[in-house]
Amino acid sequence: MGQHIGRSRRTLFERESELSAVEEALRELTGLRADGAEPADRPRGALLAFAGSAGIGKTTLLAEVRRRAAARGCTVLSARGGDQEQRVAFHVARQLLQPQFAAAQDTDLRAALGSWYDIVGPALGLCAPTEGAPPDQQGLRDGLDWVLTHLAVRRAPMVLVLDDAHWADPESLRWLAAFAPRAEELPLLIVVAYRPDELPDHAESLRGLPGRAGGRPIGLEPLSAAAVARLVREAVGTRADDAFCRECWAVTAGNPFEAVELAAKVRDRGLTPTEAGAHLLRDLAAAVKGSGLVARLERLGPSTVRFAWACAVLGTEIPPALAAAVAGLGHEEAADAADALRGARILTGAETLEFVHPLIATAVYRAIPSGFRVALHGQAAWCVVNAGLGPAAAARHLLETHPDGDVWVVQQLRAAAGETLRAGAPDAARSHLARALREPPPVEDRAAILYELGCASLLTEPATTVNHLRAALEEPIADPDLRHHIVYRLSQVLAHSDRLAEASDTLDREIRVTDDARVRLRMVAEQFMWDAFRADEPDHPARSRRLTRLADRLTGRDLTERYVIGLRTWDAVLRGEPAHVALHHAERALDGGLGWAEPDRGFEVPVLVALAFMYADRPGRTEELFAAGIAEFEKQGWRGAHLSFAYTILAYVRYRRGRLAEAEDFVRAGLRLAERVGPGTPAHWYAVGTLIEVLLARGRVAEAAQTADDYCFGAPFPAAVCFPDAQTVLGELLLARGLTKDATAELAAAGRRLDPRGMRNPAWCPWQLHLARAESHDDPERALGTALEAVARARQFGAPSAIGQALRVAAEVASGSMRVKYLEESVTHLERSPAAYELACALVALGTELRRTGRPGEAAEHLYRGLDTAVQCGADGLAETARDELAAAGLRPRRLHSTETDTLTTRERTAANLAAHGHTDAEIAAELATDEPSVVRLLSAVCRKIGTDRTGLAATLDHT
């Protein structure tokens, strides 16, 4: 991609305060004080935003910023938004980043971008998009974040300059607006300039960007009369008298661009710059812009006008040969026209052309008669494709043309949509496809275009996607495969929109009319899956029986059969069938492969199969499967809802293993991702519910309650089944807060909802256990019956962790000698399980009960073990309870020795030291040449090894 045409350096008048802010930012960026001495602290980045009307001098100011940055040895990235390029996805991002990689061979490029190659490469125009599902927008932004962070660290100090940001494309601008606040964490200065009165809706985020001016942009003011006088005399000589200069100021209103152009006109015309010639200035000033500029252009001749119009349609960085083709001029005629326009100070440049100022480009574009302008855009689209620049480059021109039933136009727009969608720009793809529908396309293509339009809206506008896909099903569809894919996609988006009943009904209608047995099997599998997630499914037991019969006769020969077997696995877990039965089906489902990122498939079934191992006390296998699944998500660039689910459920696995500090780190990472997806989504419910569970286990009840309030965690609950069950989590929270009557009501309601559906496994949802604890305050006998029923269900499932937890609760609500009996058996089971937190609870409870029954020796042993285990788990509240019990027994807690850090790898030690000294995840990721999620996982491993959490890293490392 060509670089911006440089202009001769101009004197900057009355911009001292702006340049002072620039100098201060550059000094801090390069690590120098005003006196040039080396400071003690590290270089610091910043954000500077300049706002002002057209022609006020933003471009000249930013040119000076680039010059000063380069003079200080900074790497400079530069881009400019374009009025005609706003619809070109990633136009600004490509200007900024593409030149840094454009000279690299493919092998070097792959090495530089690593796992981000297939995600950000297409968006930056560095490689062709791959087939398959596109990255989600968050994944792509994360990739662009990584690229810019990596460059900023490796090529520090760095200055990023964006001019005319109000014309930046939405994809680039949303990315930069989200990234900009991180500049202070990096050796990166971001400088943007824009017209505040011309900000489109997608650029509103610029107004709120934090910067050095108290969170507000620095406004550029018109020049004073004295400054205009200096400018004029610099251009025409000192003979310009005061009256002449003052009239120059009056007719330009102090606008720097207009003043510069007026002074040039005075010089070119040979006008005597005295009071006698001042009356001619108003006419000269009118020729600088608007109708005066147009009249001046028309005097250059029809061929030159046509060439200027073609350039205005093409936008910025204009190849002269392409402009000639659009204008319909020969080589010599086009060269003469370009020379004339350069002489008239309308165009500049040689190998690529640009308008001298965006105001001129806008005036020329608006002067084109509307009908001719539409024709020029159509001609430009054809010329762009003919020049080999591709459908995506032509699409912005086709969007400006009138519908005419042209099949070629439909083909180009569909091709452009496919390319931009796979590059990660669904909004642009939607606009291309919507325009293709208005062309209109041939009747036989309408369903396919509506399907493509639905796919482009899938991740951002689910309601719109449903409408497009339902409209597609109303069209005549000759290709059965297309119809089936429409149905699959429609059911998926309905389910992901918490409309599970509609998803099931959609599949049910199609199953009845589908002749292909394999297609029908897949639809049945999809229906089984969405029904499994329905909290309001009318007849779960009947579905369960049908699923069992179907799965038992399948061999797992293809992915659809393995999905059915995977659903049978999950059904066995929910119903509390013996764990070995669930594991048998899980292994059958995995035999042959069960990918998490299969085309046109959800990730739900692989997740459910992985969770079956966790509930059956094989969490190591669960984590292996999750690690592979997360790797698949990251490879695809799925870093929104997909990665949020993965991190959240992985946190839940760590929670059940008793690794609470790690669980909190992971669930907070999952919640951050879920907040990007949006409130009220399933990902959000999962993350908040898991965080509350973890906080309760850590003894932070007030924080858990505040979290529930902050995220409105309560009724109405989602239509989809959540892990952990949201209503049960709320009941547990109410119980922890001492609100036993409210807790009893919520937990009993959860039981009435789940029991009739056959969901009776306390390992999956321990509503009975919490209900028994709530009931014990008013009805101990009823509470014991509830707890013992849960024990029986846990014994049927057979997982030691489930049995141990149920027995511990039974002991809590029992009386007399049965309490010790239940607790001893609970400890025995939990010692054979991976549930360390539950074991700590049982040990502390047993030690407490033994102390109260006069057996201090045995009590001490269990309390010491319980304390050690609680501390290792990060269960601070439980550890405090154990210390209190030891103190009551007249015993002192043993001093715990910090785990030595000798077992840390070099990479882990580096990450830990950086985190301990306040470096952000982004900085650590850049230092280690990885991404932020990988940093979260790495630091969690470090915390596990040295027995602390993120907040305690500094103290632990200093101590050891």
Image (tube, rainbow, N blue to C red):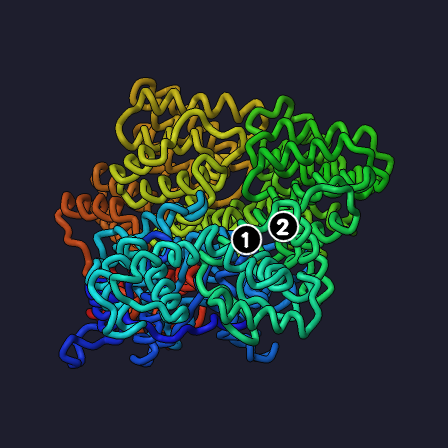
Can you say which quadrant of the picture contains the C terminus? Answer: bottom left
Please give the name of the residue rendered at 61% of the width and 47% of the height, measured from the top-left corner.
369
Q: Which of 354 and 772 is in front in this view?
A: 354
Q: Are marks 1 and 2 in contact (CB under 8 Å)?
A: yes
The correct choice, above or below, for 118 with respect to 658 in the image is: below
Residue 365 has which mark? 1
Q: Nearer the viewer, residue 125 or 904?
A: 125
Residue 114 percent location from the top left of the image: 53, 71
Can you say which quadrant of the picture contains the N terminus? Answer: bottom right
Please give the name of the residue rendered at 62% of the width and 55% of the height, measured from the top-left corner.
420
The correct choice, above or below, for 858 with respect to 35 in the image is: above
* Mark nearer the N terminus (1 vs 2): 1
Q: What element carries label 1?
A: helix
Amino acid identity at mark 2: Arg
Q: What element carries label 2?
A: helix
Please give the name of the residue rendered at 66% of the width and 66% of the height, measured from the top-left corner.
324
Q: Which of 628 and 90 is in front in this view?
A: 90
Residue 430 percent location from the top left of the image: 62, 45
Residue 16 percent location from the top left of the image: 20, 66
Q: For the residue carrying disc 2, how many other residues have a C-alpha within 10 Å: few (<14), some (14-19), or many (20+)? A: many
Residue 564 in sight in this render: no
Amino acid identity at mark 1: Tyr
Residue 177 percent location from the top left of the image: 39, 54
Q: Tell me the distance, in whole angstroms, between the alpha carbons under discs 1 and 2.
A: 8 Å
Residue 373 has which mark? 2
